[in-house]
């Protein structure tokens, strides 16, 4: 059996960017033949990509691309399994390039985005190759593309875990930045009351009625109390009703801020990485044990 040296492993890793242990296994299987080992790795990386496809991807990043002087914007969420991979330069590059493609080509859905050209292949082939290279599943979860009625502003926060694009008319770039930062911090569900689901409002009303009755409030006052509770809820979950996070007096609402600046918000989009997805719950020791068991197969 040919001796597999550290320099051979290093050379194969430089050629393929595959993990060191994968390189060593491939060289052993290829009896030290670098070319054959590289070929084996190409096959194995693709196999690894398909095996990883069943694993949960609830970490990741949000990437934003603005074009045409703030007239077109795109935001993409790409997920992976661990926060460590979310900081990988190749993963971040994939996210940024996907956002640029969405802005330029306006694909109808994630499937259409995956089919767009990227590098020497497509977005999907690039994603698959990266899954194989890193050894961790990743997926393009969602994207949004905005065409401005006024001008777009954006903000990315918390290690690219929260992303915002806001379309405003009037006001300056600082106002645009402040609005995007506020949305990231306060996470409104809608622009105004018209965008809040009727089911949510009905639920808040029922809860307010029950609380008022349990507190022994007069029946004649219950509807008025419920109205006040619903309005308070609307203010909390709508952008225009929220208190501006940078308000000096702690009282100025976004609606009041916009009026003072002669501005309006036409629309906004907010992505929070992994929102609504199941998180991985296995601990580190269990994960290492699982990987060791898989290596024995």
Image (cartoon, helix red, strand yellow):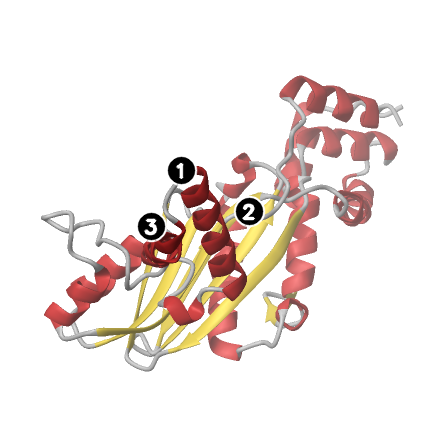
Locate the N terminus by quadrant. Answer: top right
Q: Position of residue 111 (x, y in %)?
A: 68, 69
The image shows residue 235, relative to residue 146, as above or below, that is above
Distance between the Cα atoms at labels 1 and 2? 39 Å
Mark 3 and mark 2: span between their CA atoms?
A: 17 Å
Q: Foreground residue, 148 or 44? A: 148
Depth check: give the residue in front, 244 or 93: 244
Q: Residues within 10 Å of mark 3 (few under 14, many from 20)?
A: some
Mark 1 nearby-residue class (10 Å; few <14, some 14–19, many ≥20): few
Residue farthest to the bottom, as pictured: 149
| Residue 116: quarter of image | bottom right
Residue at point 80%, 40% (across, down)? 37
Q: Earlier in the sequence, mark 1 or mark 2?
A: 1
Q: Is residue 260 left or right of residue 84?
A: left
Residue 90 visible in rendering: no
The disc at residue 186 is: 3
Give the distance between the C-alpha atoms of the residues marked 3 and 1, in whole angstroms.
30 Å
Tag on residue 274? 2
Picture residue at 80% right of the left edge, 35% below the top: 26
Total numbered labels placed on residues in the image: 3
Which mark is first along the chain, 1 or 3? 3
Q: Which residue is mark 1?
A: 215
Q: Of circles 1 and 2, which is in front?
A: 1
Residue 174 is drawn in which quadrant? bottom left
Q: Residue at x 64, y 58 (%)?
A: 126
Looking at the image, residue 33 lies above or below residue 252: above
Instruction: Identify the element where label 2 is drawn.
Output: loop
């Amino acid at each position: 059996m040919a001796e597999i040296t550290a320099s051979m492993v290093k050379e194969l890793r430089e050629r393929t960017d595959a993990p060191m242990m994968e390189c060593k296994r491939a060289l052993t299987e290829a009896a030290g033949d670098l070319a054959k080992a590289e070929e084996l790795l190409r096959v194995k990386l693709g196999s690894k990509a398909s095996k990883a496809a069943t694993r949960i991807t609830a970490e990741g990043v949000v990437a934003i691309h603005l074009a045409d002087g703030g007239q077109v914007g795109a935001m993409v969420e790409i997920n992976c399994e661990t926060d460590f991979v979310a900081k990988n330069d190749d993963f971040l590059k994939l996210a940024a390039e996907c956002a640029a493609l969405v802005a330029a080509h306006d694909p109808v859905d994630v499937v259409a985005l995956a089919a767009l050209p990227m590098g020497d292949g497509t977005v999907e082939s690039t994603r698959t190759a990266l899954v194989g290279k890193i050894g961790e599943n990743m997926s393009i979860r969602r994207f949004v593309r905005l065409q401005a009625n006024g001008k777009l502003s954006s903000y990315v926060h918390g290690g690219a875990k929260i992303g915002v694009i806001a379309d405003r008319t009037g006001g300056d770039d600082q106002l645009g930045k402040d609005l995007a930062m506020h949305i990231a911090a306060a996470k409104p569900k809608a622009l105004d009351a018209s965008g809040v689901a009727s089911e949510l409002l009905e639920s808040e009303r029922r809860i307010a009625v029950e609380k008022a009755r349990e507190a022994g409030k007069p029946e004649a006052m219950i509807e008025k109390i419920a109205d006040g509770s619903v309005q308070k809820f609307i203010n909390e979950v709508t952008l225009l009703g929220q208190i501006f996070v940078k308000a000096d007096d702690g009282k100025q609402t976004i609606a009041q801020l916009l009026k003072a600046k002669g501005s309006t918000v036409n629309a906004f989009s907010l992505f929070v990485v992994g929102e609504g997805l199941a998180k991985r719950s296995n601990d580190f020791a269990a994960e290492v044990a699982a990987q060791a068991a898989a290596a024995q197969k």
